[in-house]
Amino acid sequence: MSESEDYVYDETTGEWRAASATPTPAEPADTVRDSVGNVLADGDSVILIKDLKVKGTSQTLRRGSVIRSIRLTDDPEEIDCRHETIKGLVLRAEFVKKR
């Protein structure tokens, strides 16, 4: 005797699919992740993992610098933050690690 399998109706294609083949909803598409995959949220502190030259200034943010109180933007690859010497700083999430 064969095992019974559950089926789910897919409204977009109009077909019945096996429940095991249906992708489960993971996280929202706008989740921001750091360089190692940790989920970032507003107010988190992050550490730079690479020296970054800041456009428009002659300053370089050093690896290991701590950035406090980040804010998430509409773009999941960018975070808005403030540094002691630079205001209105936008960093790519790939260059930071959650503290």
Image: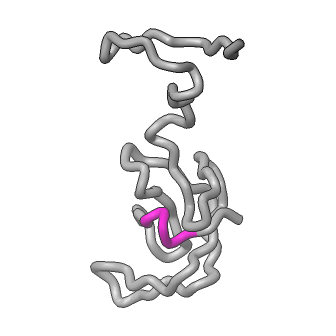
Seen in the picture, residue 74 relative to 57 is either above or below; the reply is above
Pick the residue in front: 10 or 25. 10
Seen in the picture, residue 89 relative to 28 is either above or below; the reply is below
Pick the residue in front: 2 or 56. 2
Q: Residue furthest front?
A: 1
Quadrant into which the N terminus falls: top right
Q: Quadrant of residue 29?
A: top left
Q: Is residue 87 left or right of residue 65?
A: left
Pick the residue in front: 31 or 82. 31
On the image, the x and y values in percent for residue 81 come to 50, 60
On the image, the x and y values in percent for residue 58 come to 35, 90
> Magenta region: which residues?
92-96
Quadrant into which the C terminus falls: bottom right
Q: Quadrant of residue 64?
A: bottom right
On the image, the x and y values in percent for residue 12 come to 32, 16
- Report the residue at 33% width, 83% height from top: 57
